[in-house]
Image (tube, grey):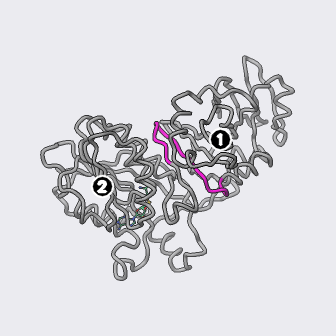
Amino acid sequence: MTIDTKVSFTPVRVVVRNDGLYLQRRGESIKVPASEATARYISQAGMSVFDVLIGSTTRQALNISERLVLSPSGAKDRTLTPDLIQGLNNMPLLLSVLPGQKMQVLFLRLAEDLSNMKIYAIKKHGAIPLSESDIVPVAQIERPTLLYPTAEISALPSEQRDIIYNLYRYGNYITEMDQVFIEWNASQDRNVWGPSIDTVYMLYALRKHGLFNENTRKVAEIGTGNGMLAKAAVIHAPNLEQIEITDIELTALACAERNIKVNLRDGVYLAGIHAPGLRKIDRNVDLLISNPPYVPKPKAQETNPYEGTGLIREVVAEGLSHLNPNNPEAAIMINISSLALKDFHDFIRGRDDLRVERLESLTVPLKINWTQINPEWMDFLIKECGLELRDPSVFGYKFWHTLHIYKLSIK
Ligand SMILES: C[S@@+](CC[C@H](N)C(=O)[O-])C[C@H]1O[C@@H](n2cnc3c(N)ncnc32)[C@H](O)[C@@H]1O
């Protein structure tokens, strides 16, 4: 197994063989004892630019999806470009810091192809502008499958681990991918779904499959949460005229609007709709986006139409009638977890008018609050919905599922 890692400017190749771990740089190969792959070891070996942090034990870190966490040690991060710093400076969360007030912000940057996630601490001391030295790189996760990857963070040396946990605990987050910056603040954005792996995976798929193009004039997002996907349309669809965002949480609409307005240009109409489902959105949209709730619940449809997979059912049933009939590329992009596939197949059965394409799939841990799930429900998820159980000592997390990004359009 060979893992190529690159942080900013020094590539270090980590080769794993049966007899141990080898770090290779500029033709040199150094065998690293399994439990001693520490920053000290690597600097002794002449690799002073970066610390390669393998975690508490090599076995543990390598088993976590073969990922390594690397951290620049005081090195200049050349990816912190003036544009990026300007993007951060535009965020209202940072703008609202008063002179003299100290604040730390967690800044997560996802590579456009999702190959890595960089974790930074933003040191904010009073008024703007933020400078490069205020943005401190802390760690990098290769091939992230969560935006709060607790298993990988736990495997870091204690100083880094504790800094990162504190940053999450302070509750000031800025997430960026593909120039879309989203801020989320724990006290301001109560009940708002912050950016998650689902969100960035949807964004990746929307971009990769060209869903933001010159014919994307009207977009609606059902269940906008933090607004990242709607904001991506504002930034990346060059001829956008109208963006409708809906949510059942008023706080979500406030969060999404606050984030979107930073990039809203003249001539683009933003409508925030506080209503469930699709009932109040336009009948003429070019793109309908939804990352709906997807954890099925036993007997949900008998009690609350929107519990479990109810929103998926409504998007499948009603979505096509909201698409622009004059745009042959008009489509629905929806994220369906493997947990909800059975329901999804029931919903699309017999629908001769619907073209269904699966565009992307990614297996990720399911962050499930099992204290709120009774044994009957858990049993249902495992037996009826295919919730995958893995050995957490090997994979870092116990519960797993697969995100499937579907494109639905008129046949
Ligand atoms: C999984 S989160 C996705 C949030 C955001 N779009 C993202 O991708 O990060 C689902 C969102 O749908 C909202 N929601 C749940 N049921 C809904 C319904 N019936 N109609 C509209 N929004 C709903 C939730 O409040 C939440 O913000």
Give the image quadrant in which the ligand numbered 1 is located. bottom left
Residue 268, disc: none
Q: Residue at x 18, y 52 (%)?
A: 284
Residue 217: tell me if it is visible.
yes
Where residue 229 appears, as percent x and y from the top left, is: 40, 48
Q: In the image, is residue 213 part of the stretch drawn in magenta?
A: no
Toward the bottom, the furthest residue is 303
The rendered magenta stretch, by its main secondary structure, is classed as strand
Q: Between residues 177 and 29, which one lies in front from this camera angle?
A: 177
Toward the left, the furthest residue is 326
Give the quadrant of the N terminus.
Answer: top right
Residue named by callout 1: 120
Question: On the rendered structure, is 39 left or right of 67?
Answer: right
Residue named by callout 2: 271
Mark 2 residue crowding within 10 angstroms, few (<14) / some (14–19) / many (20+): some
Q: Is residue 409 above or below residue 373?
A: above
Mark 1 residue crowding within 10 angstroms, few (<14) / some (14–19) / many (20+): many
Question: On the rendered structure, is 375 left or right of 221?
Answer: right
The residue range painted magenta reads 168-182
Where residue 147 appears, as percent x and y from the top left, is: 57, 50
Residue type, numbered disc 1: Tyr
Question: On the rendered structure, is 45 left or right of 294?
Answer: right
**What is the spatial separation of the Cα atoms under label 1 and label 2, in whole angstroms?**
33 Å
SS class of the residue under badge 2?
strand
SS class of the residue under badge 1?
strand
Toward the front, the furthest residue is 99
Residue type, numbered disc 2: Ala
Q: Is residue 112 above or below residue 292?
A: above
